[in-house]
Image: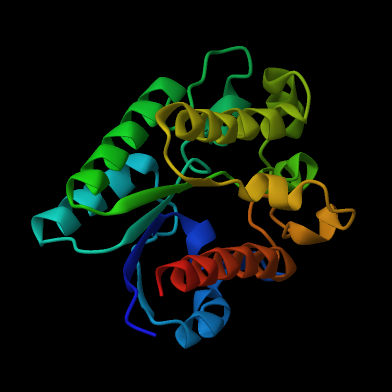
Amino acid sequence: MSEFGAIYVYGDSIMKATCPDEDMRYHFHIDEFLKSFKELPVKIINRAKFGASIEKGNAILDRDIEQGLQCKYALVEYGGNDCNFNWQEVAENPDGEHLPKTCLDKFVSILDSMVKKIKSTGATPVLMTLPPIDSEKYLRYITRNGISRDNIVKWLGDVDMIYRYQEYYSNAILNYAMSSGNPVIDMRAEILPRKDFKSLISKDGIHPSEKGYKIIFEKLFNILKNQILVAA
């Protein structure tokens, strides 16, 4: 089988397979989950960064293009940090107006820009929806050091608003991909129907567990393997 070509991965901590330990210290497990990919005739360049928003990803892409980006596919996975809020500020002013790190219109605009830049290099952009989160776990996580849970819930209206707002961004990715005709991997749909859903989300509520990452990377592996077989 001939060399399939390079695949660049642009994303946040999800694409680093990040999990917290019992003391809420984060560890990257990406090397473990990419072991099986080594059997495929493809080079994977992982440009994901912990905590990255889509603006950061766009800047990374710009630098790669300036240096002569050459790849067959570029996977784009952002939104988890973009839809997040400054919870300390929310807790201190639960009656005020608070904006996410990246407002949705700006998020979709930058996503569109990244897609067009990737296409301009001759590569195919592939988008990915966001793995779901667990609102209650995440609320426990962000209030673990004394931030007022009551004030945050007062501002949210209800705890599940955290989940719904993150899904709002994930749906925007899916809608953009469908309306623009770009390929998308609906990872959210891969996880939501599972009866063991709770065990697929880590203790912080926003990162998959190692069990959850196994599902994600097995899905990515199978998609890539099938593409290589078609191209062979």
Q: In this view, does 82 lie to the left or right of 118?
A: right
Q: Residue at x 40, y 30 (%)?
A: 180
Q: In this view, does 228 lie to the left or right of 210?
A: left
Q: Which residue lies furthest to the right in this view?
A: 195
Examine the image and state in which quarter residue 158 appears.
top right
Tell me residue 186's x, y (percent). 60, 46
Q: In this view, does 64 lie to the left or right of 127?
A: left
Q: Which residue is drawn at 69% across and 22% down?
A: 156
Q: Which residue is drawn at 70% across and 45% down?
A: 189
Tell me residue 43's x, y (percent). 34, 77
Examine the image and state in which quarter residue 215 appears.
bottom right
Q: Can residue 131 be seen in this snapshot?
A: no
Above or below: residue 65 compared with residue 138? below
Of residues 171 and 226, which is closer to you in this image? 226
Above or below: residue 206 compared with residue 71? above
Above or below: residue 79 compared with residue 24? above
Quadrant where the N terminus is found in the figure: bottom left
Q: Residue at x 53, y 58 (%)?
A: 14
Tell me residue 5's x, y (percent). 30, 72
Quadrant where the C terminus is found in the figure: bottom left
Q: Colour mode?
A: rainbow
Tell me residue 147's x, y (percent). 66, 38
Of residues 108 and 3, which is closer to you in this image? 3
